[in-house]
């Protein structure tokens, strides 16, 4: 073992989720602490303010689930908004659709993008040089507030866990604004935290989206090194014909390009809601 190696842990609710490796970057931006670790088994890993965001070997479990259930639902995929996503993985998955004309990626911390381009080139890859991708450095909530009505086909929220600078991305007000800027047949996709290690916020996200949109559904799967492993993604729309349907012409091509996601996987993951979450959401709904 190389003596320079360091164990880096995300500490969450009295548990630790750790990786061993060499620290390549340790940088304090004006928003957060950014660490990039060269790990022994998971390639390079990005940690923001003590929380794992992504790893070379684990990122597809997350990014493919965030993007494809939403985009294969759409008949027209022209304009996409990504909130967060500074490592480039979400943009990379969206750019697989040749019909996509424009992606606005709105990231609050330019340093995450700069360091991801330099050290996590396997994640963003050619997305960074794709002319369809427009980078905007600003607050996601403000961007959404200032966007036109009926503008985007898909809004994809790839944010970090709730914190002082991301709390507003989990609010009913934010989801209401997202609905306003989506086209009538548009779809929202968001990472919706863990039903185990972030149960309260998970329930809050599901309940808020149920309230704001006519249709919503959650997929449950696994992301290595996120607290407790089990993770979720929630989709929402007001338009039944486009909601988690198979509208995209070239789904096979997308399936073949993925390491994790496919239609069977999606079908199973949409049925994975744990009983205790089903019950709590029912109680929550009956309380209203
Ligand atoms: N607990 C980590 C949740 C982070 C979700 N976003 C990750 C960004 C990857 N593009």
Image (tube, rainbow, N blue to C red):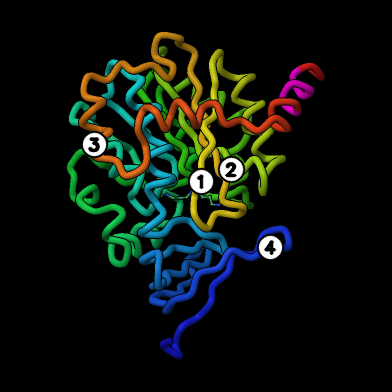
**Quadrant of the image for the N terminus?**
bottom left
What residue did someone put label 4 on? 15
Magenta stretch bounds: 280-285
Residue located beneath label 1 in the image: 222
User: Does residue 281 appear to the left or right of 66 in the view shown?
Assistant: right
Q: Is the C terminus in the top left, top right, bottom left or bottom right quadrant?
A: top right
Question: Is residue 234 part of the magenta span, yes or no?
Answer: no
Check disc 3 and report the residue beneath it.
256
Front position among marks 2 and 4: 4
User: Where is residue 112 shown, x and y percent of the image?
Assistant: 40, 59
Q: Residue furthest right?
A: 287
- Where is residue 13 shown, x and y percent of the image? 72, 58
Q: Is residue 164 positioned above or below 211 on the image? A: below
Is 120 above or below relative to 7?
Answer: above
Relative depth, front residue between 113 and 142: 113
Which residue is tagged 2?
A: 193
Q: Is mark 1 within 8 Å of ligand 1?
A: no
Mark before the other along the chain sequence, 4 or 3: 4
Measured Cα–Cα span from mark 4 to mark 3: 36 Å
Image location of residue 147, percent across then percent down: 42, 28
Residue 277, horizontal then vertical, whole percent: 70, 31
Residue farthest toward the bottom in the current orientation of the protein: 3
- Residue at 51% of width from left, 32% of height from top? 219
The secondary element bearing badge 1 is classed as strand
Query: Residue at coordinates 39% horizontally, 14% vertically from top-left?
Result: 242
The Cα atoms of the two marked residues, 3 and 1, are separated by 20 Å
Q: How crowded is the residue under tag 4: few (<14 C-alpha within 10 Å), some, or many (20+)? A: few
Instruction: Report whether residue 101 is seen.
Output: no
Residue at x-position 23% and y-position 53%: 125
Q: CA distance from mark 2 to mark 4?
A: 16 Å
For the residue pair 142 and 279, the one nearer the viewer reads as 279
């Amino acid at each position: 073992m190389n003596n320079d190696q360091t164990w880096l842990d995300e500490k969450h609710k009295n548990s630790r989720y750790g990786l061993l490796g060499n620290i390549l970057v340790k940088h304090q931006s004006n928003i957060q602490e950014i660490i990039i670790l060269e790990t022994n088994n998971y390639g390079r890993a990005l940690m923001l303010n003590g929380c794992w965001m992504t790893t070379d070997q684990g990122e597809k479990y997350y990014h493919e689930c965030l993007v494809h259930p939403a985009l294969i639902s759409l008949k027209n995929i022209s304009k996409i908004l990504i909130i967060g996503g500074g490592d480039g993985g979400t943009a990379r998955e969206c750019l697989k659709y040749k019909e996509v004309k424009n992606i606005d990626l709105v990231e609050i911390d330019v340093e995450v993008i700069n360091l991801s381009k330099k050290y996590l080139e396997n994640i963003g890859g050619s997305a960074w040089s794709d002319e369809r991708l427009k980078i905007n450095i600003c607050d996601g909530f403000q961007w959404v507030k200032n966007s036109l009505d009926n503008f985007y086909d898909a809004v994809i929220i790839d944010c970090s866990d709730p914190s002082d600078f991301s709390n507003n991305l989990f609010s009913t007000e934010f989801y209401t604004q997202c609905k306003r800027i989506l086209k009538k047949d548009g779809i929202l996709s968001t990472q919706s935290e863990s039903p185990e290690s972030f149960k309260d916020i998970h329930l809050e996200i599901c309940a808020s989206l149920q309230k704001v949109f006519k249709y919503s559904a959650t997929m449950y799967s696994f992301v290595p090194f996120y607290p407790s492993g089990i993770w979720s993604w929630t989709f929402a729309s007001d338009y039944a014909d486009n909601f988690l349907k198979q509208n995209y012409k070239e789904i096979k091509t997308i399936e073949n390009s993925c390491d994790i996601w496919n239609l069977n996987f999606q079908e199973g993951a949409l049925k994975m809601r744990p009983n205790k979450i089903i019950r709590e959401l029912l109680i929550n709904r009956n309380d209203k």
